[in-house]
Amino acid sequence: MSDAQSSADGDALEVSVPSDPLAGHAATAYFWGHVAGSGDVSDDRIEVVANDEASAGVLAAVAGGDLERETTTRDYAHDTSITRTEDEYVLTIDADDGESGLLGRSGALGLPVDGRGNYRFGAFAGHERELLRGLLEGCGTVCFKSSSGTVGISFVHDDRDLLAFARELIADCPVDAPTGDLSETSSGGYWFGVDDAAAPDFGTWLYEDCEETGLFAPSRRRKLERSLEQADAYDE
């Protein structure tokens, strides 16, 4: 294994990553969760987008590639009349010019992706929390709902099957966290949310002990912590 340096909340952390980015490991589970949530895999390229510079650095440490910062404006998934502009960090991993191909494989089918573009996560059994954390940071949202004084955690993606898989991961996690049904968004994708009453316990479990591995987006964790604090103040 090799160690990579990552910055979280201003502190340098050592992130342990395996030599094989397809090995069953917490870091690879986090990476492929991100790829599934906000990435694209083809025969000669992997491209994944992160909103947090530190987590983008971790993704690059796991699988290599070129990292670029971009500013993007896009529609809000639940209401296309609202747009938001934010910095994004795009990691691009191209196939090698030699015979090793993409991450040492000859094509996308050698990666945890099947012929229809669906993801296969069996290699990451035992690292479901990191996989789910990568998915949340790739295609999820965390917010404070001022109308009800609760924390909202939801997942949004164009791939219905991927969201169904995320619901299964949540159902199997050690925290009781019921989820709503899959629904269509106004932008044509799908979404589901964790029940508001369960969101604090689920969010706390998801980021528990994450500093020990460095496999998290500091900005997302701060958003969760602020939302939890607002909810506690609302109850008072």
Image (cartoon, rainbow, N blue to C red):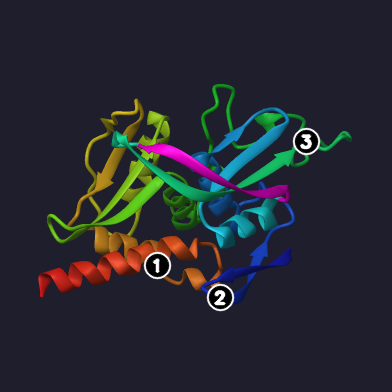
> Is residue 63 shown left or right of residue 120?
right
Q: Nearer the viewer, mark 3 or mark 2?
A: 2
Q: Tell me the quadrant of the picture where the C terminus can be found.
A: bottom left
- In the rendered structure, are the residues bearing label 3 and label 2 in contact, judged by CB atoms less than 8 Å apart? no
Residue 163, picture quadrant: top left
Q: Nearer the viewer, mark 3 or mark 1?
A: 1
* Tag 1 residue: 222
Q: Position of residue 138 (x, y in %)?
A: 47, 47
Q: Position of residue 188 (x, y in %)?
A: 34, 25
Residue at x-position 67% and y-position 54% = 60
Bounds of the magenta segment: 64-76
- In the rendered structure, are the residues bearing label 2 and label 1 in contact, judged by CB atoms less than 8 Å apart? no
Query: Label 2 neighbourhood size at 10 Å, few (<14), some (14-19), many (20+)?
Result: few
- In the rendered structure, are the residues bearing label 3 and label 1 in contact, judged by CB atoms less than 8 Å apart? no
> Is residue 146 shown left or right of residue 199?
left
SS at mark 3 in the image: loop
SS at mark 1 in the image: helix
Residue 57 versus residue 210: which sits nearer the camera?
A: 57
